Amino acid sequence: GAVVSQHPSRVICKSGTSVKIECRSLDFQATTMFWYRQFPKQSLMLMATSNEGSKATYEQGVEKDKFLINHASLTLSTLTVTSAHPEDSSFYICSAIGISGRRGSSYEQYFGPGTRLTVT
Amino acid sequence: AQSVTQLDSHVSVSEGTPVLLRCNYSSSYSPSLFWYVQHPNKGLQLLLKYTSAATLVKGINGFEAEFKKSETSFHLTKPSAHMSDAAEYFCVVSVSTNAGKSTFGDGTTLTVKP
């Protein structure tokens, strides 16, 4: 099975509503998770770094009040898109780095399959 | 600081001919380098990685890449392209001193003609 899972894989929501996306590491403990967004035919853009038990670190230009990140356990991080608008429609991908010695000792990131968000 | 440049936004080859996707990187420290493939509307799949061991790295599906420090390059090659290789390819660099944060290249679209 997948090492990192995301749920849901696709979501359609109405403008003004909030959407939560979950990222889970299934067979290892992830001290750090990353959230990316990808626009059509473009590369991945890092949005934020999520560390278990602490506040997320957001990249420049990413609104932390709009994209709420919670990393409450070593296997789960969530991204909530608040008051979504059509321009938030994108492909959101998470990745996880494991505790050294088990997974990710070379800082290889394990990517989730992505979540396609469409805001109507 | 770290950065990665994929030198070709599009590469087109005929089925059965070699594939070369070029990647140059910049890093203040010893980097880890990766190649990922992404098929349309799908997530990322790791093809191969370099993490300071052998400079010639073999990956899945017949792909390989050579780390050349003197040229700061990590080009991806395959001897014979298959139709199923048509996809988007990303070169990625990360360094341990940057908390594992990865920097993605802009991607190269590989087209395989019959």
Image (cartoon, coloured by chain):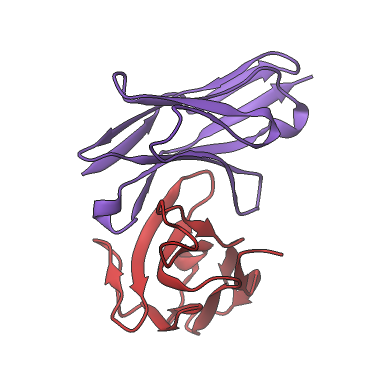
Q: Estimate the x, y position of residue A52 in percent, counting from the top left.
A: 37, 79
Q: Estimate the x, y position of residue B19 in percent, counting from the top left.
A: 61, 19
Q: How many marks?
A: 0
**Would you say residue B5 is visible in this rendering?**
yes
- Judge whether A40 appears above or below B47 on screen: below
The residue at the point 66 percent across, 44 percent down is: B39
Q: Nearer the viewer, residue B95 or B90?
A: B95
Question: Would residue B82 be found to the left or right of residue A117 on screen?
Answer: right
**Would you say residue A63 is visible in this rendering?**
no
Quadrant position of residue B29:
top left
Q: Estimate the x, y position of residue A23 in percent, counting from the top left.
A: 53, 73
The residue at the point 51 percent across, 78 percent down is: A75
Q: Nearer the viewer, residue A72 or A18?
A: A72
Question: Would residue B42 be found to the left or right of residue A80 on screen?
Answer: right
Q: Nearer the viewer, residue B34 or A36?
A: B34
User: Which chain is displayed in red in the rendered image?
Assistant: A
Question: Would residue B111 be found to the left or right of residue B11 on screen?
Answer: right
In the displayed orientation, state which residue is furthest to the right.
B114
Q: Estimate the x, y position of residue B54 in percent, counting from the top left.
A: 46, 30
Question: Would residue A35 be found to the left or right of residue B78 on screen?
Answer: left
User: Which chain is displayed in purple in the rendered image?
Assistant: B
The residue at the point 26 percent across, 42 percent down is: B2
Q: Nearer the viewer, residue A54 or A107?
A: A107
Query: Which quadrant does the C terminus of chain A fall into?
Result: bottom right
Query: Which quadrant does the N terminus of chain A fall into?
Result: bottom right
- Judge whether B4 appears above or below B15 on screen: below
